[in-house]
Image: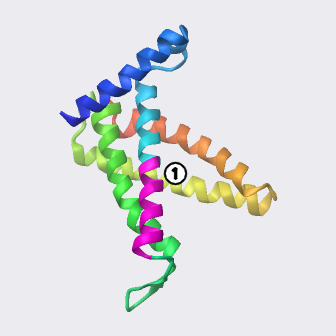
Amino acid sequence: MLASFITKIIDFFYEKIEKIVPKFSKIVSPEFFRYGFCGCANMVLDWVLYFLIYNFVLRHEMLELGFVTISSHIAAFGIVFPITLFTGFWLNRNVTFAQSSLREWHQLYRYIVIVGTNLLVMYSGLKLFVDMCGFYPTPSKMLVTGITVAISYFGQKYYSFRK
């Protein structure tokens, strides 16, 4: 029910844009638009949760677990990542690629494989562009993010949630 409601909201915006930009549907499919919309919503959720946990839960202090101490910015990432991993999976499974007939556990495993691949690509890309090529970090992050978005979309479409 929630997925249907979210899909209707996204499709409403898609139709409005299509009326303003007549060839929009030839450039951007409804599925890709849903993917982008859900991805952006999950990213904003990630940023908000990270901000709240880093600033108000951890209060910029090291997280002492007894056997290890973790810096607050890494601890916040470690707390938020599983949450947004599963919200991203739910949105992709139920809104973007709802027509997939694969079992949920297969989809989840494959989704995690793609997310792990993107983490490796992000790390490697940043190391390459910033540390080896001497490029500025922010444009490097933007470039590598574009690469990971493409990997993620095609990986999710043709691997995690294939029909």
Residue 97 visible in the snapshot:
no
Identity of the residue furthest to the left in this view:
1
Quadrant (top left/top right/bottom left/bottom right) for the C terminus: top left
- The foreground one among 5 and 160 is 5
Which residue type does callout 1 highlight? Answer: Asn
Residue 132, by quadrant, is bottom right
The residue labelled by disc 1 is: 118
Whether residue 20 is visible to the viewer of this picture, yes or no, is yes
Which residue is rendered at x = 35% and y = 32% of the image?
Answer: 96
Image coordinates for residue 161, horizontal then vertical, percent = 33, 36
Q: Give the range drawn in magenta.
A: 44-58
Quarter holding residue 53: bottom left
Q: Quadrant of the N terminus?
A: top left
Query: From the viewer's perspective, is 50 left or right of 162?
Result: right
Q: Position of residue 119 (x, y in %)?
A: 52, 56
Q: Is the magenta stretch mostly helix, strand or loop?
A: helix
Q: Residue at x 56, y 45 (%)?
A: 148
Q: Residue at x 79, y 55 (%)?
A: 135
Residue 56 in the figure: left or right of residue 138:
left
Q: Is residue 76 magenta?
A: no
Vertical placement of 53 versus 38: above or below? Answer: below
